Amino acid sequence: MPAKLKFDQVKVGESVPDSITNGVTRPDFVRYAGASGDFVPLHYDQTFVEMAGIPTVFAQGMFTAGLLSKCLTDYVGIGQVRRFKVRFATRVWPGDVVTCRGKVTGKKEANGEKLIEGDLEAVNQKGEAAIKGSFVAACA
Amino acid sequence: MADKSMIGKTGKPFTMPVEWSKVREFARAIKDPNPLYFDPELAKRESGGIPVPVTFLQTAVFWQDDSSSPGMGGFDIRRILHGEQDFELLKPILVGDTLTGVAKVADLYEKEGGRGGKMTFLVVETEYKNQKGEKVAIARSTLIETGQAVKA
């Protein structure tokens, strides 16, 4: 699997480069519903959400987590992620600008692999965290 | 009410073929244009096959039914929040693999919440093996049912 990082060159405290999605849309949520099989109507059915007392549809947490995973694999390479953990905080609404970013917090060797670990987050345009997460990834 | 006797209950094993069309569709949905998902020749050279996105195992729901999804019965979808999701990726998963998943209720508990009233937490852990019998991944999902619909 293609590793993008050399273990010796990664510094603790180094940033995972930002990945910005400028304005997520209802069609994004519909596309994710079809791709993932998450058909919870809160994410595309306006009539349903209004009946539940919510003003409009909002992103599947795992849609935003997908954006965050792409930010991570752009940095470490596809196939290098060993752990990806996310906790959902505030919701992501249509029109929100989602910035995904992270930071390396540690390095270790385990199971014969050179691993880095770090924190991840997806924040909206107000700076509120939609997701707080963490990762472990293998380096060359 | 959280029925504690559910803890440890496992669903029937389910089979999940890993298909290229689904991988491409998923990569597009998460806005990842990485050519490893779209160019089989490149993927073969670089990865030994077309890899799957980090969160791709979410698509297991297409292959699961009530008998393989323990713990979800009785949850009201208007009041469900996805609290946490955790993937341990132990070995590569490639297009062409056939995975077998077994889901287990790892925990079920209640907590007094803030704006949503009493909350029920359900933790489902799904273990995946490939066609060679190797354990490739563990997915851990925490779902929350709130006492009432959470207002924005």
Image (cartoon, coloured by chain):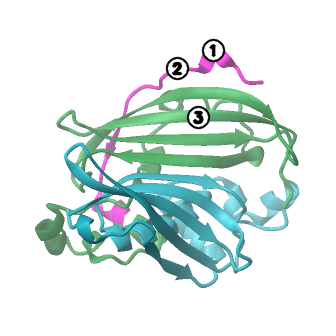
Which one is in front, B74 or A104?
A104
Which one is in front, B123 or B59?
B123
- Residue labelled with disc 3: B123
Give the SS element for disc 3. Answer: strand
Q: What separation in Å lies between label 3 and label 1 (alpha carbons)?
A: 14 Å
Q: Earlier in the sequence, mark 3 or mark 1?
A: 1
Residue at x 54% of width, y 81% of height = A20
Report the amino acid beneath label 3. Val
Q: Is B18 placed above or below B43 here?
A: above
Which quadrant would residue B133 be assigned to in this image?
top left
Chain A colour is: cyan
* Residue that lies at the very extreme toward the bottom in this rendered image: A22
Q: Position of residue B102 (x, y in %)?
A: 40, 31
Residues shaded magenta: B1-23
Give the SS element for disc 2. Answer: loop
Q: Is A85 placed above or below B14 here?
A: below
Q: Earlier in the sequence, mark 3 or mark 2?
A: 2
Q: Position of residue A131 (x, y in %)?
A: 62, 61
Q: Is the residue under label 2 in contact with that under label 1 (CB below 8 Å)?
A: yes
Which quadrant would residue A88 be assigned to in this image?
bottom right
Give the SS element for disc 1. Answer: helix
Q: Position of residue B60 (x, y in %)?
A: 43, 46
- Residue labelled with disc 1: B5
Q: What separation in Å lies between label 1 and label 2 (alpha carbons)?
A: 8 Å
Residue at x 52% of width, y 20% of height = B9
